Image (cartoon, helix red, strand yellow):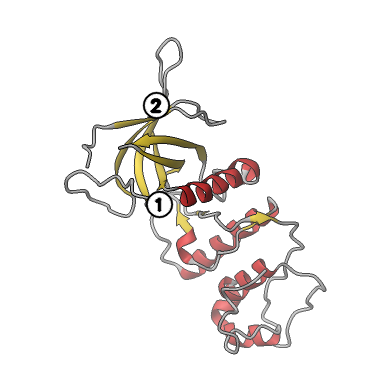
Amino acid sequence: MFNWQTTYTFTQPSRLFPYTQVAILGEAEKRTFQGAPLILTYDGAHCVYRATMVRRGTEDKNTTIPVDVALKWVAGKDRIERLKREAEVYEKMLGPVRGVAVPQYYGFFMGTVERATVACMILEWCDGFPIDNVRELNRQRMIAATKLHDAGVFHGQLLDPRHFIPMRDGTLRIVDFSMAKAHNCPGAVPLSMDPNGDPRPAESCGELDVMESRYGVDAERHGRQLRWANGMYPELVRSFFYIYD
């Protein structure tokens, strides 16, 4: 256990924020906290914490204004390697869409807590309100997904609604790039209202196709008719929405 005033200093350099200090406020999924949150250090531990971050002062001891952040925290060799890979995706592949379609990224750090090796990835804290209008929610999902593909990134798990986090401006941020890969996207065709189906290109993006079939605005109202007209048969293939490439 620790008290809320504890500050962790991660001194392994990050390309974006060398020498960063973080004060953990509590677990991200809990809106109110009673007592001190438990910091996990056992092998295989993982948690997302809400925290405030300041960049450690330069020679004149100045610091930046504290920033609300999300701490994706892990312990254990396997989880640290997976988190390190995800951090590389943020650093090397997601630059054009950081702070636009994915959270802003502040760095990957490693350290020792209670004699255990831990690692954390520090991201923008996303605290918008859920989008109640289903049509608008689906529209924002499609906008975020197409921006991600424009940047050349295939997510691999976009049909899990937990990977879309609302922002205060009404947009969404995509999270969890543990299965992401580089992608030369051929694009996809939005579903229209034509009951005979739309002209389909010879090559089409599997991820955007299933996104459109699940979240396309017209598909929401006349889903089955439009999917079948376009050769999409999720009713017959249980894995249709979840396994794609």
**Image quadrant where residue 116 sits:** top left
Above-or-below relation of 3 to 164 = above
Asked if labels 2 and 1 touch by Cβ distance under 8 angstroms, the answer is: no
Could you say where residue 181 lies in the image, as x and y percent from the top left?
65, 55
Looking at the rendered structure, the secondary structure element under dot 2 is loop
- Give the foreground label among 1 and 2: 2
Q: Identify the residue at the far right of this view.
A: 202
**Disc 1 element:** loop
Q: In the displayed orientation, state which residue is furthest to the top.
A: 60
Q: Residues within 10 Å of mark 2 (few under 14, many from 20)?
A: few
Quarter the C terminus occupies: bottom right
Task: In the rendered view, tell whether residue 56 sits above or below residue 70.
Answer: above
Is residue 12 shown above or below 72? above
Instruction: Residue at 34%, 44% (x, y): give it.
Output: 50
Q: Residue 31 at x, y = what percent?
A: 27, 52
Outermost residue, left direction?
35
Q: Which mark is residue 128?
A: 1
Within 10 Å of the Cα at label 1, are there few (<14), some (14-19), or many (20+) other Cα atoms? Answer: some
> Measuring 40% from the left and 52% from the top, which residue is drawn there?
128
Q: How many marks?
A: 2
Indicate which disc, 1 or 2, sits on the residue closer to the N terminus: 2
- Tag 1: amino acid: Gly
- The quadrant of the image that shows the N terminus is top left
Query: Image check: 37 left or right of 71?
Result: left
Disc 2: which residue: 65
- Residue drawn 55% across and 84% down? 238
Whether residue 23 sits left or right of residue 162 in the image: it is: left
Q: Position of residue 122 (x, y in %)?
A: 45, 40
Give the residue type at disc 2.
Answer: Ile
Marks 1 and 2, Cα distance to the nearest angstrom? 21 Å
